[in-house]
């Protein structure tokens, strides 16, 4: 990857210039494109890692440190199905909502060592939630649940609704047949009772009446931070939430958040079997006593309603009848439906950093975390970055921008850039990227090839730096989509 990788774009530009010269003798010479940020201030390491079949990992090191104590590292992993039978997929690990590291999630993909993922990064944006005081977590699990911020799908199973995004949805990568496609995504969720009555439901696998990180529909209202003590808490007193059988925690009970009264509603709870038949319907949510733990039955689903959502379930989800669950995923950019069949995985974000080889004009220049620079009194944006994209060769690409492990254990190992600076760095002919989606960064930033982790831990627990537990991961795994070179 040492030569420019966007020859098609260069050829198109050259052809346009040539045609312009044939129609106007006075045409001015084409402007010389300035060197990219990557070419100006980054050096490609001589060692290119091809130790894992189907994976090429190229590393770039920052030359001028710009008020930093150690250079940042940019890593590019290209997945090549022409050299090994590999394709891109996603996973939620041991269960949706369960907090695990990327290494743990990838290790759980297959018990067969030969089918272990060949490369992977952390995936969607998410929020960590404290468990309900009455809940007993699964053995070995963290006492937290994780709530997706946007669409998450594995093997056609929807784990969360889209963010509302003023009715336009938010960005996500649809991964199908081993290749990612980045667009705006919007979900449509409905319940239809046996009497034909239909109602929309709000979300999947999270506490009714309380959404984190983004509004799920037009009825969600932001709770002031001085009230909730948290950023981005949304409330809606009238909701229905579905729980799938891969949700591995007990379903929520009322009273998880004392600052959000809408989720205090005891509400109504309905259990569906694999055919949609109502096998139980009762007042209250999550169990009548502190000791009772309600889990989704294997192959079944649970519906929880509060406010008018609970009223609809009481009236229409009658025991012995069937309730049809409608779930549609729409490509808001092209106005088409994406069938939720087993070939489809999805990870979500708020921002696409490259679209058709250009930085989107609407991309903000955000920075969520700053830290002290080398000189006293100065600050650097320390948000580590992760991206998923495609190259000019049509191959999936995983990207991380991070710091290096510090010599001591008193300074964070995290380091990165503002969102637009990250995009500018990726918008280099030397990398040959066409589309790229910004994934969860900061302490979530993790890159693996084989069983080796190439990014430093940045979350501090009991004085020790560890890799963060995440909601889902994107990985290149052994698949039937590989096309061996002749």
Image: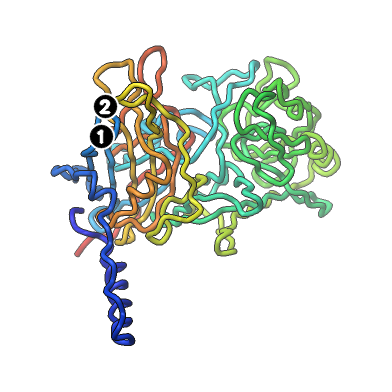
Q: Residue at x 40, y 56 (%)?
A: 435
Check disc 2 and report the residue beneath it. 69
Q: Residue at x 65, y 50 (%)?
A: 166
Q: Residue furthest front?
A: 26
In what element is the residue under mark 1? loop
Q: Position of residue 456 (x, y in %)?
A: 31, 28
* Disc 1 from disc 2: Cα separation: 7 Å
Q: Residue at x 54, y 55 (%)?
A: 184
Q: Do residues under tags 1 and 2 come within 8 Å of each other at their CB atoms? A: yes
Could you say which quadrant of the image residue 245 lies in?
A: top right
Check disc 1 and report the residue beneath it. 65
Q: Position of residue 350 (x, y in %)?
A: 52, 45
Q: Residues within 10 Å of mark 1 (few under 14, many from 20)?
A: few
Quadrant the C terminus occupies:
bottom left
Left or right of 112: which side holds 187?
right
Q: Residue furthest top?
A: 462
Q: Which mark is residue 345?
A: none
**Front position in the image: 223 or 131:** 223
Q: Position of residue 270 (x, y in %)?
A: 74, 36
Q: Position of residue 398 (x, y in %)?
A: 34, 46
Left or right of 313: which side holds 428?
left
Q: Residue at x 36, y 55 (%)?
A: 390
Would you say residue 451 is visible in this rendering?
no
Left or right of 173: which side holds 49?
left
In what element is the residue under mark 2? loop
**Residue 104 vertical placement versus 419 (above, below):** above
């Amino acid at each position: 990857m040492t030569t420019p990788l966007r020859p098609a774009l260069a050829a198109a530009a050259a052809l346009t210039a040539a045609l312009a010269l044939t129609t106007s003798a006075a045409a001015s010479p084409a402007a010389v494109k300035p060197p990219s940020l990557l070419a100006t201030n980054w050096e490609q390491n001589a060692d290119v890692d091809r130790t894992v079949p189907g994976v090429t990992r190229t590393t770039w090191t920052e030359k001028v440190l710009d008020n930093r104590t150690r250079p940042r590292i940019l890593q590019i992993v290209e997945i090549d199905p022409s050299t090994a039978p590999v394709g891109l997929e996603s996973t939620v690990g041991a269960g949706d909502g369960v907090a695990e590291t990327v290494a743990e999630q990838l290790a759980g993909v297959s018990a067969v060592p030969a089918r272990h993922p060949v490369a992977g990064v952390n995936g969607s944006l998410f929020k960590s939630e404290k468990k309900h005081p009455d809940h007993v977590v699964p053995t070995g699990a963290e006492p937290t649940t994780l709530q997706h911020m946007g669409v998450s799908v594995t093997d056609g199973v929807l784990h969360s609704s889209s963010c509302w995004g003023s009715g336009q949805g938010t960005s996500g990568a649809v991964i199908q047949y081993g290749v990612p496609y980045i667009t705006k995504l919007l979900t449509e969720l409905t319940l239809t009772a046996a009497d034909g009555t239909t109602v929309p439901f709000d979300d999947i696998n999270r506490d009714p009446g309380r959404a984190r990180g983004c509004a799920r529909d037009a009825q969600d209202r932001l709770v002031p931070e001085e009230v909730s003590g948290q950023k981005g808490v949304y409330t809606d007193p009238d909701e229905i939430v579905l729980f799938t059988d891969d949700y591995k925690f007990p379903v929520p009970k009322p009273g998880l958040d004392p600052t959000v009264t809408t989720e205090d509603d005891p509400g109504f709870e309905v259990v569906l079997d694999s055919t949609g038949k109502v096998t139980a319907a009762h007042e209250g949510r999550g169990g009548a006593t502190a000791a009772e733990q309600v889990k989704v039955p294997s192959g079944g689903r649970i519906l929880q309603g509060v406010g008018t959502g609970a009223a609809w379930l009481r009236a229409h989800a009658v025991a012995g009848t069937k309730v049809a669950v409608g779930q549609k995923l729409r490509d808001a950019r092209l106005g088409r439906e994406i069938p939720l069949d087993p070939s489809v995985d999805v990870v979500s974000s708020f921002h696409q950093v490259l679209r058709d080889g250009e930085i989107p004009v609407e991309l903000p220049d955000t920075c969520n975390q700053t830290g002290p620079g080398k000189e006293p009194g100065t600050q650097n944006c320390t948000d580590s970055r992760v991206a998923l994209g495609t190259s000019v060769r049509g191959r999936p690409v995983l990207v991380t921008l991070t710091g290096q492990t510090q010599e001591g254990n008193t300074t964070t190992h995290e380091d990165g850039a503002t969102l637009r600076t990250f995009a500018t760095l990726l918008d280099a002919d030397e990398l040959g990227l066409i589309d790229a989606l910004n994934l969860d960064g900061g302490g979530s930033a993790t890159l693996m090839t084989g069983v080796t982790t190439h990014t430093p831990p940045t979350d501090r627990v009991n004085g020790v730096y560890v890799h963060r537990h995440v909601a889902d991961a994107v990985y290149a795994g052994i698949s039937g989509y590989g096309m061996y070179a002749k």
